[in-house]
Image (tube, rainbow, N blue to C red):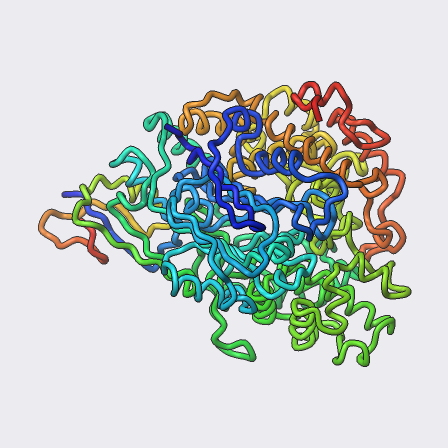
Amino acid sequence: MKKELIITPAKCIGCSTCALTCSLVNQGEFDLAKSHIRITKYDFEGIFLISFLSSCKSCHQCAKACPSGAIRSMNVPDNTGHTEGGAN
Amino acid sequence: MAYGYAGKMLIINLTDHTITEQLLDRSLQTLYLSGTGFNARILYDNIPPGADPLGPENVLIFSTGVFCGTNIPTACRTEVSSLSPATGLFGTSSSGNYWGGELKFAGFDVIVLKGKSEKPVYLQINDSKVKIISAQNIWGLDAWETIRAIRSKQNAEAQVACIGQAGENMVRYASIENGPYDAWARTGLGAVMGSKNLKAIAVKGTGAVRVAHKNEFLRAVNKTRQAIMDSPFYKPFSKYGTMLVTIPYQEHSILPGRNYQTGTIEGWESTRTRKQLHHYTKRGVACMACPIACAHWVEIKDGPYADLQLKDMEVTPVIAFGAGCDIDNLPAVAKLTEVCQRLGLDMVSAAGAVAFSMELYQKAIIDESELGFKLNWGNQKSTIKLLENIAHRKGFGDILAEGTKRAAEKIAGSEKYCVHVKGLECMLIDPRARWSTWTLGYITNIRGGDHLRTRNPVENLRHNDNPRPYRTEKFSFPDEMLQTLDMPDALKERVFDPKTGDVDIPQMSKWSEDLISVYNAVGLCIRPPVLHTVGPTLISEMYAALTGIHISPEEIIKAGERTWNLQKLFNSRHGEKPEDSRFPDRFYNEPSSSGKTLDREKVAEVLKEYYKARGWDQETGCPLPDKLQELDLTNQ
């Protein structure tokens, strides 16, 4: 078994807690430009897109912080593919 | 190096278009924290008695909370303050969304706006690059159009605070819109912005908010998040948002139905409550760093407002328009929300003005010839038309644009239907049918008739009992609720009766006003799951880990008390009288549909108890010298 990030974009509420937490944990400060996750907000449409940079180290702190279930950390068998959305 | 704070204040003189930066003063931080505390200090020091709220001598301040730009749950709020054109007193409003975090990332905590530009302008902030730009091409646009126009020209990701036509035309309850769907709504701050010929402040920041002690900070934030999510209020508020309370309001007869003529509305539960929410919304939308997501993404699929999409269905417009004006369905309320958001109107005061007018129409004090249309209860088209006329100051709308208090002075026989406190329309709950800490707040509130600055963090809406009339409200939650309330034990014993748990309303009012002042200083949201669990202990812990500055829980709450007292001193200096702290006559003289009226003497007695709890003179309601000394406010 290994841990994978499961992404469900439709559940994203746009709070950016994942990106804020990522930048603090990995960069030591709150800097959304340095976060490994980007939440692109289309506020007029109420749409939030989650994307991961290739620099993501899979520390899963974003999943721990996500309050909506849009990013979850799950145990999956070693021989399966992993995500609905594309993080590693 | 600044931690937590960006460390800088931006001072804009709109008269001569000068832009200066100033470092934040350390003593300002320790005494007032940030947000509303900073604003109280700066306004008190900068606005002389007799100043015109719509004159160049007024000052408009945007102060972010020190917690903004971090992952502290709900920490995203910015306080905007000024001398209010609605009340002539301390005008102030809090709003969340992303604007405050963006300003911090751009490198500023505070923007102070002085003077008046000769021509319309907007302020563009791209990190340290600050420009004053002509707004000739966007003046006259509504708020949504303004945001789109600025984003297309500047930066698609800019966070935009702006006014609509109501602000431009200095409607005394114009809002400042915060993105398309949020606002600094109350006390007419949009009119101040309009008076300065300032259309918008667009911000984009790419910098950082630094943390003094990362590991301690992460621990404190995790503890706070867990406390919020463990609160029994968390799940229901995440699911229904503030719409949760729409059914109890009807059950207790506390709706402001048809301008407070009735506390219950026939068919309410099947038309305007959380039970209908699922027809129009499938998901929540959050402000920055918020785990609650109390707002709903709304999509209206059919009917006259088909294709309308917005972030909405919150208790305020549903109660203010849905009950106050008897607009009888949620899609229509959503449409009115959109109209107010675009025109830049405070929905509470705007609904108050419409409800007042509808009652005048009902009582034949005004008629179709004056209005240009019929204005019967629940008339959606006429409500939209009247809101547009208010924003553009057309016809009868021009009279209403001055606020209902001033309008009532011009319309013979209308005064008894005018529901305001200190000039601010109150259109949410009826204190006659259910008395609580919350309702006393209508008259103790620094900013006038409003329900958002005084509230019992563990209010039990299932009950409507006053074990000691006017003095206490019932608690009646499990003991764990009291144990998880972050309040000093000694104070808990004074506020909650040790035997019955009943809540002492004057003591709770003081505590909650001080605590909410702290929230509005550091940038937290007052939604019940937060207010219940996050008090001075957790705030002190997070503040120390974030900023590296140690302020004890006692000093944290004292900063809130200091702010509230300074705002009261500001109000006294600007003409507030003891007799202004009273409910509209209607609440004393006319029974609501519950059959109840307010008892004038009992209200006066409990107000005196509140003044006593505050250390204020019981006759004048002003802070006494000992209190001022205790709060380091002796040199005012």
Q: Residue furthest front?
A: B16
Q: Residue at x 73, y 27 (%)?
A: B614
Choose top left, top right, bottom left or bottom right for residue B83: top right
Q: Give percent across and percent down for residue B613.
A: 74, 26
Question: From what the image shows, is residue B552 above or below residue B236?
Answer: above
Q: Is residue A42 shown above or below B92?
A: below
- Given residues B16 and B376, the one toward you in this image is B16
Instruction: Give the camera-side residue of B316 and B61.
Output: B61
Q: Residue at x 57, y 22 (%)?
A: B555
Whole-percent x and y of residue B202? 45, 54
Q: Position of residue B99 (x, y in %)?
A: 46, 49
* Image quarter (top left, top right, bottom left or bottom right) of the C terminus of chain B: top right
Image quadrant of residue B408? bottom right
Quadrant for residue B168, please give it: bottom right
Query: Is residue B197 something one can see in this rendering?
Result: yes
Residue A2 in the figure: left or right of residue B489: left
- The reply to whether residue B462 is in sight is no
Position of residue B72 measured from the top left corner of the image (x, y, whole percent): 42, 37
Residue at image location 73% in from the left, 66% down from the top: B354
- Location of the N terminus of chain B by quadrant is top left
